[in-house]
Amino acid sequence: MGNNQPKKYRNFMIGAASAALVASAVAPVVSAAEFSDVKGNTHEPAIKALVEAGVISGYPDGTFQPNKTLTRSDVVKMMGKWLVSLDYEIPADYKTNPRFKDLTSKSNDELLKYAALVKDNGVFNGYADGTLGAGLDITRENMAIVLVRAYDAIHKTDLVTVVKETEFDKDVTDLAKAKAEARPYIDVLDYFDITNPVAPQFNPKNTTTRGQFASFLYKTSNVEVGEEVDTEAPKLVYTGEKTLNVEYGKEFTAPVVTATDNVDENVEVTSVITNEAGERLTAIDTKVYGTYKITYSAVDAAGNNAEDVVVTVKVAEPNSLEVSSVEGLSATQVQVHFNLPVDKATLLNADGTFKTDVLSMTSLDGITPGNLTGTLSADGKTLTITAQNVLSKRYDVVVDNVKSYNGKNIVKYTGMVTLTADKTAPTVVKTDRLSASKFKVTFSEPIKELGTVTYKLANGTVVSGSGNGVTNDFTAGAKEVTFTIGSDVAANQDVVASFVGTRDMAENLISPNPTTVTFQKGDKDGVKPVVSTITQTGAKSFAVKFSEELQAAPTVTVSGMTGITVVKDSTDPTVYNVTTTSVLDNAKTVVVSNAVDLSGEAGETTTKVVTFVSDINAPKVQSSAVVTDETNMKQYLELTFDKNVDLGSTPTVDATGSFVKNYVTTTIGETDLTATSVAYKNPLNKKVIRVELDTFLGTTFDVEGAAYTLDLTFNNVASEFGVVAPKAAVSFVRGTDGTPANTAVVGVEAIEQDTSDNNKVNVTFNKEVDGASASNVANYTISGAVIESVTLKPAIDGKQVAVLNLQKGSNTFTGVRNISVQNVKAAGSTKVMEMYTTSIVSLNENIAPTVKSAVLVGTNQVKVTFSEAVTTTNGTQDFELVIGGATVAGKTTVTSPTTATPGMESVTFTLQDNVSTADINSGLVFKALNTISIMDAVGNKLSTATPITITQ
């Protein structure tokens, strides 16, 4: 193949024609090379260089306005003209086939041309939902993507792959704040020092100004690439699921990197991954289900390209909803990741609190989390739990009774998460411009104290933090704070906000301290927002699209209708979805008013006569199936319509027909079945309704294993336009209803020590319990004590008590304990209880007092010394006297002193009669009676396992 050739380099800026075209997109009009507002500006060298090259220019008033932000349409036009200068052709179908959902054939012709060109060449792909968002500002992370893709398109390179496989010292410190797609492109800018090493924060979420773009474009224009020498191209051969060969026999496993045949030759193999929408990805996300394509490309040292090989990979959706992981986020937050999008209605209430029995967080160390609230990510896969109190150490997390977006039940999750003390400093993640005078600052975690915030203009003038200066809406525990700039600040002025002493919930100071952000107060842009389109989206809904984003929802009225709601679209900020309470049909007058754009420019009231079209076609049953419900194990006949259906008051289904069992046909007449209620299987899918077969078929006609052929008649089932559902013919085989699992969950009602025996602790359950689980010692823990066994008492009034028998002497102190009960089931239930913990139950120690000595201190008195202070009931008989191994009549009774003082370690007992020398020589012993009343201060009775020898 020959030796490697020395690389020749060419500059990215190709010719004056390209430069002139770039200029027309970046600046509105041509002006002189010197500007009144760039002297001393950080971007001055780049601006001057690009002006001298004829790339950019300024405004007629002699200004360049380096702080003015660029919109996405500005960048699309610029990049499109750039490609045209390099002999790229405008697609012929640019007008009839707009490349973005929010463009129509009536959109600006210039924008349509260049949007088609940049989309087709992979330079500008738009948002994930297929929209362009032309009027929105372009962020720095998206700017990085566009610049690198433009370079790749022009030079047929893949800088992302080149940089990814190159070791280098990275300067950018906030790469993690960028979206995953943008990170490798920011790496490219970092690698070529297009980013500023002196200012390591890239601020990917911030907008891009004219000055910033000038610097980035100038630096990117000086990136050099080599020119190649023609030779024979290598070959790629796909030989199996994971194996890819080149013609030299080298094997690769996806994703492929580089192979070297010998010192004279190397072949570089790269992979480009795209999803079903054609969007380019850095890797296949196994949690995003669908079909992916991996396009393998190979190039040798001379630059010869092999024919691409495309491999299709399918990631299938799992069969059940599961928790993938649980992790701590901050001092008050925990994040739960799911493998499928969750149905929010089964998880959270409208106020962010959790539905009953779906989530619990129980501290194992007595650090209670307090009230819990949650937020679900837009894709439904990530739940962020925010606790009222600061979290620390170990927590048992239980997630249950939740469903996925498509109705799959969750596999109950029980796990422990250990949260280390939060030592991570909070940071400012991004600053978003909400309107001309409102800005939202987002922190990396909830903030406890905003600290001291001061405001200054760029020239150092102090701006008040109240009144007509700058105000904010901070509340403790917030992650986002909105700042409003008042009339003290003129339009187009920068306000620098400095945060000093800002602390997170764990008292960590912000980093850096102080942190500064800049707000640029806008002015009315002179362009009023206008209604672009009004599009019917349903029987009772339509969408109003504006030419630009608004500050808030506009007012929308429809002739003759009340109860109208207007909500901003979740994917397109220029669209508002309008819902009515009545069906939209025929011509209606729609009035749109109070539309104010982000600059504060108010639009005119728009009045349009809109012709709404009613769907006169009846909803038809497309398919039917018998399905067993996972919860109650009963069989349902599920009916899927070709469109959404509305269920009116008491919707029902009735039927006539027949069924066959053992070759015998039985007819079902018009009065044999009773109209039975139907319901949505899932409220989120209004195409599918179902009826319980057990109720529908009744006792007489419900036959297991029978094959049914029925004509269904619906009542109060209609399309969204009110067209009644017609009869439908269905056939199915009746199976067997299962026995629903008993999912009753038992709880602990009380835990208390036995009043007469410190060796027993009684746990009262609020239901009768499963004996095996309730008597399992492993399901109970008492800190500082050993549980030997568990005894169950009979259930009374639906409740049952488990007696925890403590090992004698194992409970060494009196006071409150950590006590936990877990894994106990209700009688007959398949579901274990939620872990119960308490740290407020006080238990007495169970170390029984013993006799240290017994001494004869008189012919009828014995002094007994105990291991601790004891009490005894005055005048009672605690012992009997044994002389010579036998009781002696007239001398056996031993009486407690009538003057005994509670809490004595020594007690003198009186014998019934005097003992003689012969008695003493025979041996004197105390033997405890069953009536013994001697106990310590907390009620532990004297331990007298062996007789007590009396000495002199």
Image (spheres, rainbow, N blue to C red):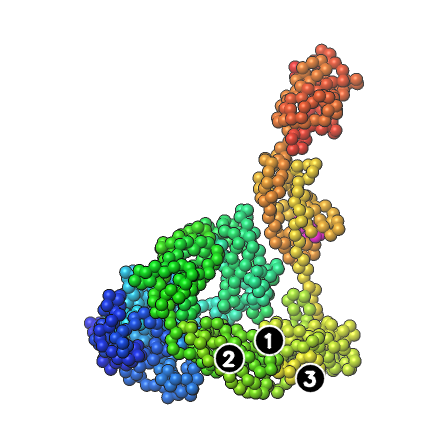
Q: Secondary structure at mark 1?
A: loop
Residue 517 in view of the camera: yes
Residue 134 at x, y = what percent?
40, 77
Crowdedness near tag 2: few (<14), some (14–19) or many (≥20) residues, C-alpha within 10 Å: many
The residue where tag 1 is placed is: 563
Note whether 781 is above or below 826 in the view shown: above
Closer to the chain start, of discs 3 and 2, is 2
The residue where tag 2 is placed is: 592
Looking at the image, is mark 3 or mark 2 nearer the viewer?
A: 2
**Pointers 2 and 1 in contact (C-beta within 8 Å):** no
Residue 178 in view of the camera: no
Q: Amino acid at mark 3?
A: Lys
Q: Amino acid at mark 1?
A: Gly
Closer to the chain start, of discs 3 and 1, is 1
Closer to the chain start, of discs 2 and 1, is 1
Name the residue at 69% across, 38% down. 755
Note whether 846 is above or below 602 in the view shown: above
Label total for image: 3
Question: Which residues lie in the magenta part?
Answer: 767-774
Crowdedness near tag 3: few (<14), some (14–19) or many (≥20) residues, C-alpha within 10 Å: some
Q: CA distance from mark 3 to mark 1?
A: 34 Å
Q: CA distance from mark 2 to mark 1?
A: 15 Å
Residue 678 at x, y = what percent?
68, 75
Can you tell which quarter of the image residue 274 is in? bottom left
Q: CA distance from mark 3 to mark 2?
A: 42 Å
Q: Residue 769 lies in magenta, yes or no?
A: yes
Name the residue at 66% across, 83% down. 725
The residue where tag 3 is placed is: 727
Residue 564 at x, y = what percent?
57, 76
Name the residue at 67% across, 49% down. 749
Q: Quadrant of the C terminus?
A: top right
